[in-house]
């Protein structure tokens, strides 16, 4: 049975690192959809930074993300949805696209704030996406844990991700 893995956690918690390892391990048997990938595609196509692309193209980015998400579920491969997904509303938008009969797995990521901040600073210093550190507190405030029955399984990935 195909599986939808919905990643959840603040920036810097290891979601994309986990996704990349998961895809490498299941070469040809899984695909990933990430809003960040869509933003980066728009940024590259328009010669903009991540932040500039998001500001200029938020609606088309969201539309393309939803299109890629819907398309991913048509191939019968496992699908990894790589985003923060901290609210129930964000997860409902994803889960509403998961075909009947698929397993739905929540994959929870977290790390202490100091570790998240260190990772985000290192990412920015290495030329990656710059994420403002205040976003950690905002996401902690917005966090809504998965409800019973929302997923078939819940996996927790520790701070070493």
Image (tube, helix red, strand yellow):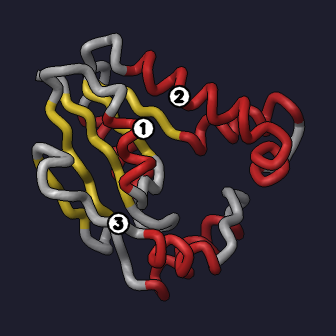
Q: Quadrant of residue 19?
A: top left
Spatial CA distance of label 3 from label 1 is: 15 Å
**Total numbered badges shown on the rendered structure:** 3
Spatial CA distance of label 1 from label 2 is: 9 Å
Vertical position of residue 2 compared to residue 88: above or below:
above
Q: Secondary structure at mark 2?
A: helix
**Outermost bottom residue:** 114
Direction from residue 43 to residue 91 in the image, left or right: left
Dot label at residue 144: 3
Task: Kindly identify the residue that appears in the image at 10 percent across and 22 percent down.
Answer: 1
Spatial CA distance of label 3 from label 2 is: 22 Å
Vertical position of residue 151 compared to residue 33: above or below:
below
Q: Earlier in the sequence, mark 1 or mark 2?
A: 2
Task: Kindly identify the residue that appears in the image at 25 percent across and 58 percent down.
Answer: 146
Dot label at residue 66: 2
Residue position marked by numbered label 1 in the rendering? 93
Mark 3 surroundings within 10 Å by alpha-carbon count, few (fewer than 14), some (14 through 19), many (20 or more): few
């Amino acid at each position: 049975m195909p599986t939808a893995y919905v990643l959840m956690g603040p920036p810097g918690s290891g979601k994309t690192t986990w996704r990349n390892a998961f895809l490498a391990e299941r070469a040809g048997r899984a695909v990933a959809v990430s809003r960040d990938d869509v933003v980066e595609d728009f940024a590259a196509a328009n010669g903009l930074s991540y932040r500039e692309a998001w500001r200029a193209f938020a609606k088309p980015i969201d539309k393309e993300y939803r299109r890629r998400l819907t398309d991913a579920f048509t191939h019968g491969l496992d699908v990894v949805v790589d985003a923060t997904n901290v609210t129930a509303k964000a997860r409902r938008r994803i889960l509403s696209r998961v075909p009947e009969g698929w397993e739905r797995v929540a994959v929870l990521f977290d790390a202490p704030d100091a570790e998240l901040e260190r990772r985000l600073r290192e990412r920015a210093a290495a030329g990656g996406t710059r994420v403002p550190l205040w976003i950690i507190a905002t996401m902690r405030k917005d966090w809504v844990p998965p409800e019973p029955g929302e997923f078939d399984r819940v996996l927790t990935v520790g701070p070493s991700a």
